[in-house]
Image (tube, rainbow, N blue to C red):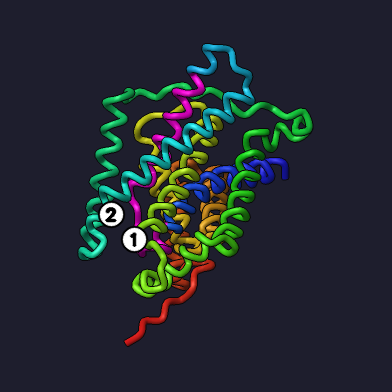
Amino acid sequence: MDYFIELFFSGLTRGSIYALIALGYTMVYGIIGLINFAHGEIYMIGAFTAYIIASVLSIYGFPALSIIILAGFAAAIWASAYGYTVEKIAYKPLRHAPRLSPLISAIGMSIFLQNYVLLAQTSDFLAFPELIPDFDFMEPYADKVGSTDMVIIVTTIVVMIALTFFIKMTRIGKAMRATSQDRTMARLIGINVDKVISVTFVIGSALAAIGGILIASHIGQINFYIGFIAGIKAFTAAVLGGIGSIPGAVLGGFVLGLTESFATGYVSSDYEDVFAFSLLVLILIFKPSGLLGREEVEKV
């Protein structure tokens, strides 16, 4: 039973990271109906930014709590700037082009960002500092779930609730929903659609940066390629939960993380991807819109 609980929390932790990144995918798809395949690299850049800031602050003797707050804030800002730039370069000029064009552009941007960080940093794995402290109240459960795991899980749930409230209750959130439903009509009623799309990319990028910091601190290392694997898994989670749905992205992340964790624990780590993508295929066969996605009715 203890082993089951350990695998369960390990799966939730892994799924929480997928969910934080998947939220960016699902927000962009919900607004413009396209997949930002450079999103995983934004996650990677957020992790590297936090690594650089944390290393500098550690040299000057900043306390651990100050380091994680300042590094997290800097990473979110820097990653948001990259997300904003990617939207302006890779998407905005192709807004009225065939759907395949911005997709290819995003893949090209993904490759560019990977190689940019490779040249600017290194191809080696770098040791990432453990920014999340151990909490005293978690000591009795340390053999099953650590402080880092709990912070990651709680952060994901809080972000999901806050983002849902933001989309439903705020002025810009309502503009996002209007743009998602009909961009032409949104323009006619005075909504600045370009601004709404840019804000969507900025928010998604900030969330990816937060995920990058948390998982890098949890694993203890980073390199230029971590964004590709995490991006593919997060995209899978978004599709699994129902792309375009915020709760669906989180649910998809949890389901994917738990599937991988139990497959690793009870079968073999060699088959975790097999089980994860097999589950995705089954979901898409029997429920093509995903677990929480809505069926789209095409008007003829």
Which quarter of the rendered picture does the N terminus lie within?
Answer: top right
Which secondary structure type mostly characterizes the magenta part of the structure? helix
Q: Residue at x 54, y 12 (%)?
A: 60
| Residue 183 on the magenta segment | no
Taking depth in this image into account, of 218 and 103 the one nearest to the observer is 103
Number of other residues with Cα within 10 Å of mark 2, as a class: few under 14, some 14 to 19, many 20 or more = many
Q: Residue furthest top?
A: 60
Point out which mark residue 124 bears: none
Q: Residue at x 78, y 32 (%)?
A: 137
Against 89, is 101 above or below? below
Q: Which of the pair 67/93 is nearer the observer?
A: 93
Q: Amino acid at mark 1?
A: Leu
Q: Amino acid at mark 2?
A: Tyr
Image side of residue 242 versus residue 68, left or right: left
> Is 38 one of the magenta-colored residues?
yes
Quadrant of image for the C terminus: bottom left
Q: Are marks 2 and 1 in contact (CB under 8 Å)?
A: yes
Horizontally, residue 14 falls left or right of residue 295, namely right
In percent of width and height, residue 30 lies at 43, 63
The x and y percentages for residue 102 are 25, 56
Q: Position of residue 260 (x, y in %)?
A: 51, 48
Q: Earlier in the sequence, mark 2 or mark 1?
A: 1
Work out how far the residue at label 2 is from the one at label 1, CA to CA, in angstroms. Answer: 9 Å
What is the quadrant of residue 140 in the picture? top right
The residue indicated by pointer 1 is: 34
Residue behind mark 2: 91
Q: Is residue 95 above or below residue 218?
A: below
- Disc 1 secondary structure class: loop
Counting labels gives 2
The range drawn in magenta is: 28-55
Closer to viewer: mark 2 or mark 1: 2
